[in-house]
Image (cartoon, rainbow, N blue to C red):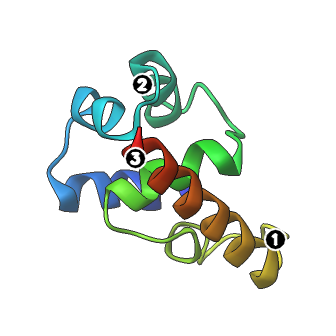
Amino acid sequence: MWLDNLKELKKKANMSVPQIAKGTFLPERTVTRIFNGETSAPTITTLIPIVKFLGGSLSEIFADTKAIIGNETLASLQEDNDVMSAERDAL
């Protein structure tokens, strides 16, 4: 399941929820709800910064699921996120 994969990525990165929230500029409560499984279907645009911050990829997180997301869509979303991250960093 994607959540188990995300938790494993968090464990490997040795990061806490507050560190992830701070590093991704997401509300800590949002990150907490995702990792606690309270948000069963977070948006891809929320997951991308978390996964990227933890050093992983969406492909890795969804590797064993039957999620229907085309590779082109994933690549496009990741590119958009990279652009937004660069713009945010420039501010």
The residues bearing labels 3 and 2 have C-alpha atoms spaced at a distance of 27 Å
Residue 76 horizontal side relative to residue 85, left or right: right
Q: Earlier in the sequence, mark 1 or mark 2?
A: 2
Of the residues under marks 3 and 2, which one precedes in the sequence? 2
Which amino acid lies under the numbered mark 2 shown in the image of this protein?
Answer: Thr
Q: 10 Å neighbourhood of mark 1: few (<14), some, or many (≥20)?
A: few
As drawn, the residue found furthest toward the top would be: 29
Instruction: Confirm whether residue 3 shows in the render.
Output: no
Q: Tell me which label, 3 or 1, sits earlier in the chain.
A: 1
The residue where tag 2 is placed is 32
Vertical comparison of 6 with 21: above or below: below
Q: Which kind of residue does numbered mark 3 sit on?
A: Ala
Q: CA distance from mark 3 to mark 1?
A: 30 Å
Residue 70 point in image, percent of width and height: 83, 78
Q: Are marks 1 and 2 in contact (CB under 8 Å)?
A: no
Q: Type of residue at label 1? A: Ile
What label does residue 89 carry, if any? none
Depth order, front residue of 84/43: 84
* Residue at image point 68% right, 70% down: 65
Res. 90 mark: 3
Where, by quadrant of the figure, is residue 25 drawn? top left
Q: Is residue 70 visible?
A: yes
Residue 48 sits above or below residue 58 on the image: above
The span from disc 1 to disc 2 (Cα, nearest Å) is 25 Å
Residue 18 x %, y %: 25, 26
